[in-house]
Every structure is written in C-alpha cells, then in structure tokens.
Amino acid sequence: MNRTTTSVQMVLASDCNGYKKARLFGGRLMSWIDVIGAVCAQRFTGTAVTTVCVDHLTFLKPAHLGDTIVQKACVTWTGRTSLEVRVDTYVEKLSGEREMTNQAYLVFVALDDQEQPTPVPAFVPETEEEKKEYAAAEERRRQRLGH
C-alpha cells in the first residue's frame, strides 16, 4: 500500500498568466494538485476515488515560466470510505534546492465499480510527524462536519 506519490512538471507558457514575469495560474496548479492527490488516494485504496473537497489551500510563493514544479502527496488520515491527502508543491532550482510554494489538503471518497462509496484501508500513523498530521486531519474533519 503506497502512502506517497511524487510528480514533476515544468511551467510552460500555456500554464501562465500575461503578467510581465509570467506566473503560473493558480487554477492550473489546483488542477495538478487534484491529479496528484487523486493518484495518491487511488494507489493507497486500490480503488477509483472522487474529490469531495479541497479543505485547505495556501499559496505561499509564485512559480514562474520555466520553473520546475515538484509535488509530493501523502495520505494523512482515513475514515470508513474517505481519506485525506496533503499535497506539498515546491519550485525546484537548477541547484536542486526547493522552495515550498503551496500546501493543500484534499478529501477523497473511494468508489466501487458501481461508483458507490466503498471502505478504504486504515491508515495507521507510525512516525511522530504522521501522528501530528493525523490528529490535525481529525480536527479539520470535525470542523468540516460542524459546518
């Protein structure tokens, strides 16, 4: 069962706005986030998934034309049929140095062949970081359900 997924993209002209120092469209980045999040969720569950919500999305720094974008997705929490995935997005410089540009939390529901919710494997956090993420994910879930 794979808990993490990595993706690499290059920011092309069609990914950017018309600003004089062309910046990556936020919507394009959101699309990439949704794709890597879904791939991570599918690899973990072994089923198709559908996005339920983007729970938290923070744009920290811009990415520009020609930048290399590295995304890392990881499962942070599971329920009965749903799971949360965190996606960290970095701009990678030619030196290999990375700067975080975005962090997002997404919730997916696993689907069976009839496109109905189906149980997911339990995510059991092992490291201290995973345990903190799991507790934070449970709090985000409580807040979502409270709305």
Image (cartoon, rainbow, N blue to C red):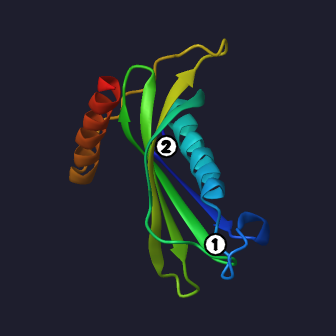
- Checking the image for residue 41, the label placed there is none
**Which one is in front, 18 or 13?**
18
Q: How many marks on residues?
A: 2
Q: Residue at x 69, y 78 (%)?
A: 66
Q: What residue sits right under mark 2 in the picture?
A: 2
x and y percentages locating residue 46 in the rendered image: 56, 30
Q: Residue at x 27, y 29 (%)?
A: 142
Does residue 88 appear to the left or right of 9 in the view shown?
Answer: left
Q: In this view, does 110 lie above or below 98?
A: above
Label 1 CA crowd tier, 10 Å (few <14, some 14–19, many 20+) = many
What residue would you read off at disc 1? 23
Q: Is residue 143 above or below residue 85?
A: above
On screen, 20 above or below 116?
A: below
In percent of width and height, residue 94 lies at 59, 86
Q: In this view, does 139 lie to the left or right of 82?
A: left
> Mark 1 belongs to which amino acid?
Arg
Disc 1 is placed on an element classified as: loop
Q: Foreground: 18 or 120?
A: 18
For residue 106, side relative to residue 132 (left or right): right
